[in-house]
Image (tube, helix red, strand yellow):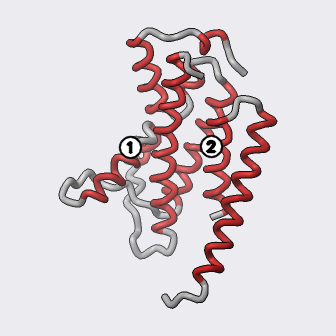
Amino acid sequence: MVIFSLFVSIVFAVLTRDDPREQLKLGARLFGGFIAAGIGIGWLLYPLPL
Amino acid sequence: MRAAAADRTQTSATLYLICAAAWFLPGAGHLWLGRRQKGLIFLVTLTLMFAFGIWLEGRLFPFQVSYPLVALAAIADVGIGLPYFVAKALGAGAGDVVAITYEYGNTFIIAAGLLNMLVVLDAFDIAKGRK
């Protein structure tokens, strides 16, 4: 999940921003968001039966 | 970084050539248009993502119209261009359905193809002079 998030964040950040500093900022925010959402949704699903 | 070549609107024949190049080799459209930084990042990232999917025992899906979801996955797989044909030629991407990483591999391969389609659209917009 971390590696997948990293790849997708890089591509989206480079695709939507032209300035390298902006790309880095957006990429970091996207990456953090993906990881936070993954962990959050994982915990939300935890009480549910398989 | 915007190069002068990228700022000019392209003729329609060149436009489609750029899109074809962008599809065939990830990032080639941006490289063609003078956006070297973006082109190189797309080339490395998308190719690595696809290779990672193959390494995780992902499958290159066949075009089976009788199974619509398989056919859609096949279209997404082809979206990556040259790496798909190289993997096919090398006999990779057979997929091991019992491998624990099988679905992860499929996700990487399909997402790499779909992201490359977005990159092609971005190259199209740049060539049109919209960006």
Q: Are marks 2 and 1 in contact (CB under 8 Å)?
A: no
Give the SS element for disc 1: helix
Query: Crowding near pointer 2: few (<14 within 10 Å), some, many (20+)?
Result: some
| Three-letter code for the amino acid on which mark 1 is drawn | Val
Q: Chain of mark 2?
A: A
The vertical placement of A30 against B9, above or below, is below
Looking at the rendered structure, whether the residues under marks 2 and 1 are on a common chain is answered as no
Quarter of the rendering containing residue B17: top left
Give the SS element for disc 2: helix
Furthest residue in direction right, as rendered: A21
Q: Which mark is residue A12?
A: 2
Q: Residue at x 74, y 38 (%)?
A: A23
Quarter of the rendering containing residue A46: bottom right
Q: Residue at x 62, y 79 (%)?
A: A44
Q: Residue at x 69, y 64 (%)?
A: A35
| Three-letter code for the amino acid on which mark 2 is drawn | Phe
Q: Which mark is residue B78?
A: 1
